Amino acid sequence: MVEQELATRCAHGDNEARRELYEQYSSRILSLCRRYASGPAEAEDLMQDAFVKIFRVIGRFRWNGPGSLYSWMSRVALNLAFDSAKRRRRLTRQLLDVEEVGEVIPEEPGYEEAALIPPEVLMSMIEALPEGYRTVFRLYCIDGLSHRDIAHLLGIKEKSSSANLSRARALLIADIRQYQKDHAEGNDAVKWTRK
């Protein structure tokens, strides 16, 4: 079933279409929720809540071409994830206000330099970022949201989103440089940890 037909049938209460929608997209929505949840149980809950809401409001979906259904569904899931985070007030305490950023961001490593770092090490560097920085970094760099969208989702200013992304990049650059230094000195057996 194509996206547009699937969404229309779901909007009309077709349980077979709902089952197909769930089977087709649940793993991707769960993966998205895992990136923003505090743990696996919360990610599962968020995914289930997202599908409940998706089935309730799918009549509002407007098809804009291939991929638009998942894009719309991911926004629903992201909104739920950030509403949950705001209720816990975790992110808002950790997000920088734009006035707090005063340092200069170091020059980013080139593609060739970054490509030498094993993916699992790079992912551990991202995971080690403070939660607010990590969230903005993921939303901007991985999920492709604009600072405007991030600001709306997190309830912050666009400039604060940009500042948090800059700070996340600065920490990652420092981590990459330290990793390169450690391995240039022949410490290949040393596991990466933020210093």
Image (tube, helix red, strand yellow):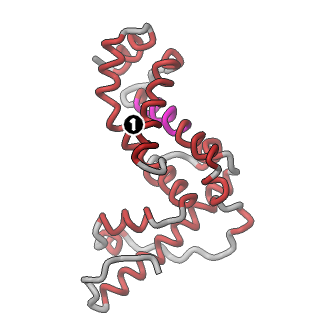
User: Is the N terminus in the top left, top right, bottom left or bottom right quadrant?
Assistant: top left
Q: Is residue 184 left or right of residue 158?
A: left
| Image-quadrant location for residue 82 | top right
- In the image, residue 118 sits, relative to residue 50, either above or below, namely below
Q: Secondary structure at mark 1?
A: helix
> Which amino acid, mark 1?
Ile
Q: Is residue 155 left or right of residue 47?
A: right
- In the image, residue 186 sits, relative to residue 93, either above or below, namely below
- In the image, residue 28 sits, relative to residue 174, either above or below, namely above
Q: Is residue 19 left or right of residue 145?
A: left
The one nearer the camera, 18 or 8, is 18
The one nearer the camera, 144 or 14, is 14
Farthest right residue in view: 99
Question: Which residue does the numbered mark 1 point to in the structure image?
Answer: 29
* Secondary structure mostly taken by the magenta-highlighted segment of the chain: helix
Q: Residue at x 41, y 27 (%)?
A: 69
Please check the rendered image and state whether residue 31 is part of the magenta-colored stretch, yes or no: no
Specify start and end residues of the magenta stretch as a single range. 70-79
Please check the rendered image and state whether residue 75 is part of the magenta-colored stretch, yes or no: yes
Q: Position of residue 161 (x, y in %)?
A: 62, 55
Q: Residues within 10 Å of mark 1 (few under 14, many from 20)?
A: many
Q: Residue at x 47, y 81 (%)?
A: 195
Q: Position of residue 42 (x, y in %)?
A: 46, 43
Q: Residue at x 35, y 38 (%)?
A: 28
| Image-quadrant location for residue 131 | bottom right
The one nearer the camera, 53 or 108, is 53
Q: Position of residue 146 (x, y in %)?
A: 56, 47
Q: Is residue 93 left or right of residue 190?
A: right
- In the image, residue 57 sits, relative to residue 39, either above or below, namely above
Q: Residue at x 52, y 54 (%)?
A: 135
Q: Position of residue 164 (x, y in %)?
A: 60, 61
